[in-house]
Amino acid sequence: MAEGAADAGVRGGGVRLYVPGARLVSTRQVAAVVEAVGHTVAARGMCCVYGNTGLGKTVAVEQALHLLPGRVPVWRAVAGVAPGLPQLRASLCEAFGLPSGALPHRAGPASQALMRALAEPGVLFIDDAQRLTPPLLDYLRQLWDAPGCAAALVLCGAGSERALARASALRSRVLTWHQVGRLDASGVPQTLSLFHPVWAQADADDVARVDEQMARGNFRTWAKITSHVYAARERAPARRVDRELIEQACARLGPYP
């Protein structure tokens, strides 16, 4: 089954699906992330969601957060490129709706304000957590060790498990580690037909061939192929989604699918 369609190919949380009408499919991988994140939030713990690039980690976490009871606040932050501590504090302050002007540069007041925010039961989701250095991860650990902290923390990103491995104090506090894998090869044709109607009449053997030779179960690669197939059908609505059209779409991805 599929969750609601994404407008203009962009899902909640800014996840880009590249094609209008795309739908999030409840694959085995998504369901596993939903379970892992749900348990972590209920336990008010920490969770690390990791795996190779393009496998749909952020999409799956966003689905897990979407399925939480409406009364559970969700705060979202994205780790910047090579952030320093003031930049991390600024991202966290923005996520919690705190003043993000001078406050992040005032270490004591900013930390106190963040600790008060974290005293509310909810979940903080930090994407691209692999960018966080050990000192920044230790700062997060200090916030979570503060008396009265009632929030859960979800860290996500390709390589985030390696980043956490270098911050032993925080690593030891992670309740749930979850690795997101590739799409199951046998289920790719059905998954694509649910992901977007453009695949409804495609030959399963053609899809399986492309998955084996190019996509290799990578969610993002299939989303890009879908975008080019969709564009071709928009130009020629009567055209079938056959092997030739799929190969033309794949060629658009160049040497780096």
Image (cartoon, grey):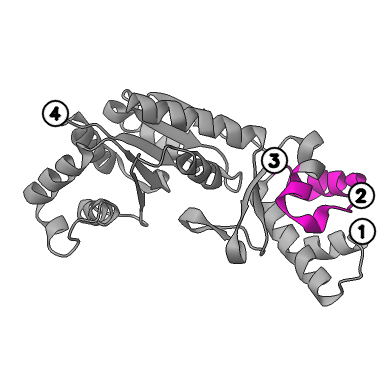
> Looking at the picture, how far across and down is residue 111, in whole percent?
13, 45
Q: Nearer the viewer, mark 4 or mark 3?
A: 3
The reply to whether discs 3 and 1 touch (Cβ–Cβ < 8 Å) is no
Write down the residue under mark 4.
147
Is 98 part of what is drawn in magenta? no
Crowd band around label 4 with a 10 angstrom C-alpha radius: few (<14), some (14–19), many (20+):
few
Q: CA distance from mark 4 to mark 1?
A: 60 Å
Q: Nearer the viewer, mark 3 or mark 1?
A: 3
Residue 1's disc is 3
The type of residue carrying mark 1 is Asp
Q: Secondary structure at mark 4?
A: loop
Mark 2 or mark 3, which is nearer the start of the sequence? 3
Vertical comparison of 238 with 122: above or below: below
Write down the residue under mark 2.
203
> Looking at the picture, how far across and down is residue 98, in whole percent?
19, 56
> Looking at the picture, how far across and down is residue 232, in whole percent?
81, 70
Q: CA distance from mark 3 to mark 1?
A: 25 Å
For residue 151, which quarter of the picture? Answer: top left
Q: CA distance from mark 2 to mark 4?
A: 58 Å
Number of labels in the image equals 4
The reply to whether discs 3 and 2 touch (Cβ–Cβ < 8 Å) is no
Is 207 part of what is drawn in magenta? yes
Magenta segment boundaries in residue numbering: 191-217
The reply to whether discs 2 and 1 touch (Cβ–Cβ < 8 Å) is yes
Mark 1 or mark 4, which is nearer the start of the sequence? 4
Q: In front here: 249 or 161?
A: 249
